[in-house]
Image: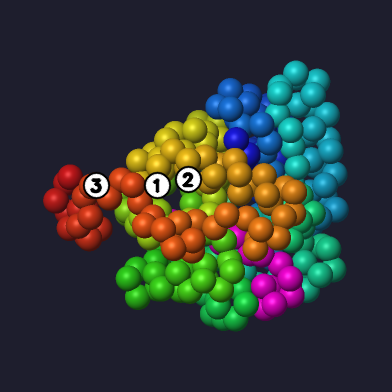
Amino acid sequence: MIDLHCHMLPGIDDGATDLETSLAMARIAAADGIEVTACTPHIYPGLYENATENIAAAVAAFRQSVAEADIPLQLTFGADIQIVPELLIGLRRGTHPTLHGSRYFLFEPPHHTVPVRFAETLFDTIAAGYTPIITHPERLTWLDDAHYGWFLDAADDGAWIQLTAGALTGEFGRRAQYWSERMLDDGVVHILATDSHDPHHRPPILSAGRDAAAQWVGAEEAERLVEDRPRAVLDDQPPSSVLPPPAQRGEAPAQGRSKDRRGWLSRLFSGS
Ligand SMILES: [Fe+2]
């Protein structure tokens, strides 16, 4: 498996605090069957002032530590890039890294506030030749039925959607799990990633999310979420050459539709 979203670098954002923690995370990832991890620290002006240069240097140093610790995990990098007006300029100048130098980059909406110019910012990057991967929409506190269409439209326009593996297994609560399952059910999810921040509360485990996804989209499509499409990102294959998620290839998306399809509010309050 390949994990394209992980806060594993020591002391660079709100992820791993020190090298020991980073190495513990690397061991967990390797034991889970993850072969490649993209270290993707936050870029958030005023909070996490990371840029390609310092991230690349941190990855080079961490790669050396992982090798010395004999942990079988390959490392590359990108960044978890918050939606800000200077995003596209940063990509063009190279101060904001894409994933493994490809055309794909992580596009992080704000967690608690509805972003302004969401669709416009996405579209600008797509028009410039990039493929934004929208990170964890299922966990956004402002996601509701009124905003859900934004993400369906974004996927139609060429953006990719990344769910958090732990959201599918319920570790982020029922609400995030509901939206994760709904997006899988609607056939618009491209990849799963761990968005791991530490070894204990948010560990870099992808396999459980893949197995949970298989209940909704079948084992083959679940494998594409953690292997085929992430591999295509690392290889910088054009999105047009990559098998899209079920809805975009005109297939009935879910093989697990027998699951409870009541609305999330009724599921939330029924206790089931
Ligand atoms: Fe993240």
Query: How many numbered circles does the render carry?
Result: 3
| Cα gap from disc 2 to disc 1, whole angstroms | 6 Å
The amino acid beneath tag 3 is: Lys
Q: Which mark is residue 217?
A: 1
From the image, state whether disc 3 or disc 2 is nearer to you. 2
Residue in the picture at 63% in, 47% down = 230
Q: Earlier in the sequence, mark 3 or mark 2?
A: 2
Q: Is residue 262 magenta?
A: no
Q: Are marks 2 and 1 in contact (CB under 8 Å)?
A: yes
Task: Report x, y in % for residue 144.
Answer: 34, 68
Rendered image quadrant of residue 72: top right
Q: Earlier in the sequence, mark 3 or mark 1?
A: 1
Q: Is residue 130 magenta?
A: yes
Residue at disc 2, secondary structure: helix
| Cα gap from disc 3 to disc 1, whole angstroms | 12 Å
Q: Which mark is residue 221?
A: 2
Task: Report x, y in % for residue 21.
Answer: 64, 30
Name the side, left or right, on which 194 lies relative to 91.
left
